[in-house]
C-alpha cells in the first residue's frame, strides 16, 4: 500500500495492488462487504451515504462512501473503492474531516484515477498464480517490459 497524507487538510489516501490466488480472488462486492462488516469496529456510528459501480486501474469495481461520526461528534468522510479480476485486487481508500471533504475531493479523485494497471502488473501466470508487481519481476525495465518506477 502507498499512502498520501495532507497534514493541512488532515486528509489521507491509500492505494494498493494486491496479488491474489487466481482461483480465490474475491470480487469487488465481496471485498466491500468485508469492509462494511468491519466498519462498526472502527466507527460505531458509520452511515453509508452512497455505493455504486466504479473503475480503478481500468478494472471494473465498486465503491462505498461512508460518514463516520467520531466520539467527539465530528464527521469524517471515508471512501473505499475496490476493483478485482482473477489474480488481482486493487484497493483505494481515503479519509477526510467532513468540513474539508469538498475542498480535497478533486485531489483525492486525481490520486484515485492515477492508478494505471498495465505499467504495474503482469498478467496472471498460467500455473494459477496472481500477477506480481512490476518491481518484483525485474529491476531492468528492458527485461520486464515496464517503465514503472517506485513511488
Image (cartoon, rainbow, N blue to C red):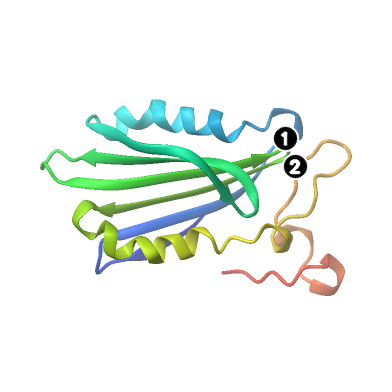
Q: Nearer the viewer, residue 150 or 84?
A: 84
Q: Residue furthest left?
A: 72
Give the left or right position of residue 130, taking residue 78 as reference: right
Per the image, the residue denoted by label 1 is: 21
Mark 1 in CB contact with mark 2 (< 8 angstroms): yes
Above or below, 52 relative to 98: above
Q: In what quadrant of the picture does the C terminus appear?
A: bottom right
What separation in Å lies between label 1 and label 2 (alpha carbons)?
Answer: 5 Å
In the rendered image, the vertical position of residue 91 relative to residue 32, given as above or below = below
* Residue 130 picture location, percent across and down: 75, 42
Looking at this view, is 118 or 16 the one in front?
A: 118
Query: Which residue is found at the position 26% from the left and 34% from the top?
Result: 43
In this rendering, position of residue 74 left or right of residue 141:
left
Residue at (25, 39) in percent of width and height: 68
Q: Residue 17 at what x, y percent from top left?
A: 61, 51
* Mark number, residue 88: none
Instruction: Count every numbered label the image shows and give the total.
Output: 2
- Tell me the quarter of the picture where residue 11 sits: bottom left
- Circle 2 is placed at which residue position? 130
Q: Residue at x 44, y 60 (%)?
A: 109
Disc 2 residue crowd, few under 14, some 14–19, many 20+, Cα 10 Å: many
Amino acid at each position: 500500500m502507498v499512502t498520501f497524507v495532507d497534514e493541512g487538510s488532515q486528509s489521507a489516501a491509500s492505494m494498493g495492488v494486491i496479488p491474489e490466488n487466481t482461483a480465490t480472488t474475491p470480487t469487488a462486492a465481496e471485498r466491500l462487504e468485508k469492509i462494511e462488516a468491519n466498519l462498526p469496529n472502527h466507527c460505531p456510528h458509520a452511515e453509508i451515504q452512497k455505493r455504486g459501480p466504479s473503475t480503478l486501474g481500468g478494472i471494473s469495481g465498486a465503491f462505498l462512501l461512508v460518514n463516520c461520526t467520531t466520539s467527539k461528534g465530528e464527521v469524517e468522510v471515508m471512501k473505499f473503492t475496490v476493483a478485482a479480476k482473477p489474480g488481482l485486487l486493487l484497493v483505494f481508500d481515503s479519509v477526510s474531516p467532513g468540513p474539508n471533504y469538498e475542498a480535497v475531493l478533486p485531489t483525492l479523485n486525481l490520486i484515485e484515477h492515477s492508478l494505471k494497471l498495465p505499467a504495474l502488473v503482469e498478467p496472471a501466470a498460467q500455473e494459477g498464480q496472481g500477477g506480481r508487481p512490476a518491481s518484483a519481476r525485474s529491476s531492468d525495465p528492458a527485461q520486464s517490459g515496464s517503465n514503472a518506477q517506485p513511488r
